[in-house]
Image: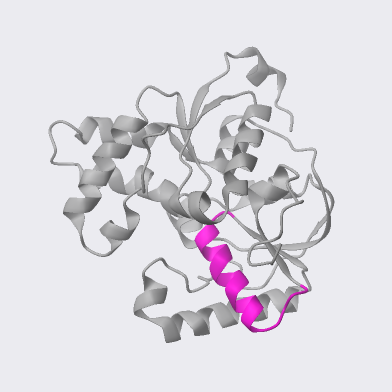
């Protein structure tokens, strides 16, 4: 990955990586890939040990008090950094969009929530929009990109991942139809409405099949795990599933998501 001269001339920003629960517990390679990409983009990267869940499950389930407590912990853990970077559109949207609303009436944290919101970015959008980074990775195959709901609708992430994927040597982007349609994960939605969720992800895997892609990419691990699970149940071992950060960083040695090592 390279960055333009004007970005290189500026002092290296001190960046904190918000790892996310799913990355931490199910796919640590995404976190390592994110660190590599950020360092290659000229950032000094730290991973605060005091970080926890972003609070999205509690907030979406109506437990606003717990969500507010979690938000306060996150704010305290991530103060003092130039930027906070999240390899997830959904967790990023929680911090950027929801925290200022959750803590709007808290005299101690309202302004701090707005300040954290202003410094927080989803990983790929930060690399493109803030750092102007370019990648030099290689990945052979035909890839189709799934636009996660939170990244697309809450944060406006659409062209940024495609901009970087177009630079990956050997990779052909084969867009699926209905790339912007929800995969059916939706956090607690797939637990509350499993039949509807399964039908939605079935529509998504059918779109992937029509694209002819042998690799599915996205910026949200929840979506990717949901899609990988459905592909596995359908017996589609020919289609691999990875987080976009892994491809951009060239971290392709580990098994794909849902694939046995």
Residue 191, located in which quarter of the rendered image? bottom left
Q: Which quadrant would residue 171 be assigned to in this image? A: bottom right
Which part of the image, by quadrant, shows the N terminus?
top right
Which quarter shows the C terminus? bottom right
What secondary structure predominates along the stretch shown in magenta? helix
Q: Position of residue 161 (x, y in %)?
A: 64, 49
Is 175 located above or below residue 43 in the figure?
Answer: below
Residue 115 visible within the image: no
Tell which residue pokes out farthest to the front in this image. Answer: 261
Q: Residue 21: horizontal and vertical position, in percent?
A: 44, 51
Judge by depth and name the residue closer to the eye, 40 or 148. 40
Give the left or right position of residue 66, taking residue 180 as reference: left
Q: x, y (%) of residue 192?
A: 34, 78
Is residue 215 within the magenta segment? Answer: no
Near-viewer residue (8 or 69): 69
Q: Position of residue 14 (x, y in %)?
A: 50, 22
Q: How is the image coloured?
A: one colour
* Count of numbered labels shown in the rendering: 0
Residue 118 is left or right of residue 198, and the answer is left
Give the magenta part as a residue range: 219-238
């Amino acid at each position: 990955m390279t960055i333009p001269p004007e970005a290189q001339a500026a002092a290296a920003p001190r960046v904190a990586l918000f790892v996310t629960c799913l990355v931490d517990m199910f796919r640590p390679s995404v976190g390592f890939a994110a660190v590599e990409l950020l360092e290659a983009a000229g950032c000094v990267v730290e991973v605060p040990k005091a970080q926890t869940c972003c609070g999205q499950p509690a907030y979406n389930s109506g437990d606003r008090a717990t969500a507010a407590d979690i938000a306060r912990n996150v704010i305290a853990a991530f103060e003092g950094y130039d930027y906070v970077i999240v390899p997830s559109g959904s967790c990023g949207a929680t911090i950027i969009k929801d925290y200022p609303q959750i803590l709007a009436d808290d005299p101690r944290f309202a302004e701090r929530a707005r300040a954290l919101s202003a410094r927080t970015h989803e990983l790929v959008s930060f690399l493109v929009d803030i750092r102007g980074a370019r990648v030099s990775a290689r990945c052979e195959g035909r890839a189709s990109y799934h636009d996660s709901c939170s990244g697309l609708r809450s944060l406006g992430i659409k062209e940024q991942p495609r901009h970087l994927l177009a630079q990956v040597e050997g990779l052909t982007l084969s867009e699926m139809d209905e790339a912007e349609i929800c995969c059916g994960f939706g956090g607690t939605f797939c637990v509350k409405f499993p039949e509807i969720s399964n039908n939605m992800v079935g529509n998504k895997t059918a779109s992937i099949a029509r694209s002819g892609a042998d690799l599915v990419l996205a910026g949200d691990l929840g979506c990717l795990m949901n899609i990988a699970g459905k592909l596995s149940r359908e017996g589609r071992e020919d289609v691999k599933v990875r987080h976009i950060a892994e491809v951009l960083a060239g971290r392709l040695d580990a098994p794909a998501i849902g694939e046995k090592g």
